[in-house]
Amino acid sequence: MRRLVTIVLLVCLGLSGAPARSATAESFPELQAAQRAAWETLGILAQGMTGSDPRRFPGLDAWLKEYRSLGGFIGKPPQNAPLRKLDPERYVTRSSTFWRAYFEQAPGDACTLLWHGALLLAGGEASRAAYVLLLARQAQDVEKPIAEAIDGLLEHAHLVVQRGAQRVAEAAKLHDEGDPAASADRLRTLIAAWPANALAHYELALAYASRQYSDAGRKPPARARLSIHSDLPASAEVASAYARARAHDPLLIRAYQGNETAAGDVLLVLGKSVRPLWDIIARDTQAGASDETLWKLADALRDAGLAELSLTAAQVLIGREGSYDDADRKFIAENLKRLAPGAVEAVLKRLAQTPAQFIRLILP
């Protein structure tokens, strides 16, 4: 039996607000607006978390201290407050502090998934945030204000991704017109404006691959054939650009070369298992995906080495079931060891408590 501690958030979620114009030559107002909305959401959720008992929920207490140290606001930040910096790898994906706090909250709770997505988006990871928020839509019994907050951040994330893709397409056209060097220069400018632009990193890998051919005294093939069809082994520069593309968008299949795991089957898993299941999730916005679909997706994501998304999909289903069993704990430990091994012991100890104690954040 689970014991839920309910914390009421006393302020409404305000996701609007015009961003300040960037002082850089390459302005990206959609990204700034998305990050501002994410920080507003985090401030509201953090205010609710301050009501937790630090003796019973030490992970949340540690996360709040870290959040404050990064300049995070408790409550909605002032409208003109400068955007804070957040390294999503250090403070979210690979953070023992984050995952301990995550598993002190009710499994599959929409507010927890909103918090996770908001942290990624605050750090500029629009593609990864969108994936978490899409899974958040599959949570059950979501209150209307939380559903609206999820959809609001998801819309922000989509706008960033779409605008980023438009800019990358313009740069890629330079490559198609026979000037990969000019394309690479433009792509580096786009990456400076949005470092998590996965498509820009991918196209930069293609531009570098084209230069490999030129340096070898060979005519480069068409841009569309420079990925897995290239007959030159990827240089360290090319491989690094592909890796950055995958890091910022783990479902960008064309950024994989098939040798990312010892088994070399990542492309097969992504193409035959993950992508078809993900399309079902993306279409169903009203918690319509079946339990079987969610478990198959969680398993496939784990097999592809995408532990963060695998955990997220599994949490949605565990939330539907209402409690953790031995198989759930084993699955969580397997994925968590890939991300933040330092959190595994504390998380498993929490999940093995009888009765288990979790916090659920709700809106009044």
Image (spheres, rainbow, N blue to C red):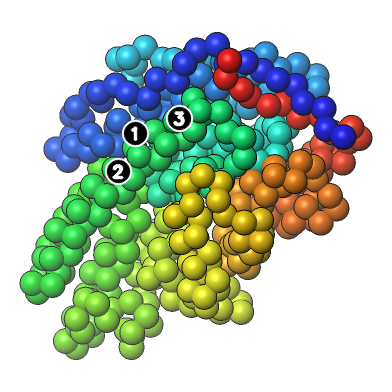
Sequence-wise, the earlier of marks 3 and 1 is 1
Residue matched to label 1: 34
* Spatial CA span between label 2 and label 3: 17 Å
Which residue is at 34% across, 70% downward? 238
Q: How many marks?
A: 3
Task: State the image coordinates of residue 29 (x, y, percent, origin top left).
Answer: 23, 34
Label 1 environment density (alpha carbons within 10 Å; few <14, some 14–19, many ≥20): many
Which residue is at 51% across, 44% downward? 286
Residue matched to label 2: 160
Q: At numbered mark 1, what does the secondary structure look like: helix, strand or loop?
A: helix
Sequence-wise, the earlier of marks 2 and 3 is 3
Label 3 environment density (alpha carbons within 10 Å; few <14, some 14–19, many ≥20): many
Report whether residue 235 is seen: yes
Task: State the image coordinates of residue 109 (x, y, percent, origin top left).
Answer: 64, 36
Q: Quadrant of the N terminus?
A: top right
Q: Are marks 1 and 2 in contact (CB under 8 Å)?
A: yes
Q: Amino acid at mark 1?
A: Ala
Which residue is at 18% across, 64% downward? 172
Residue matched to label 3: 149
Dividing the picture into quarters, in which one does residue 97 lie?
A: top right
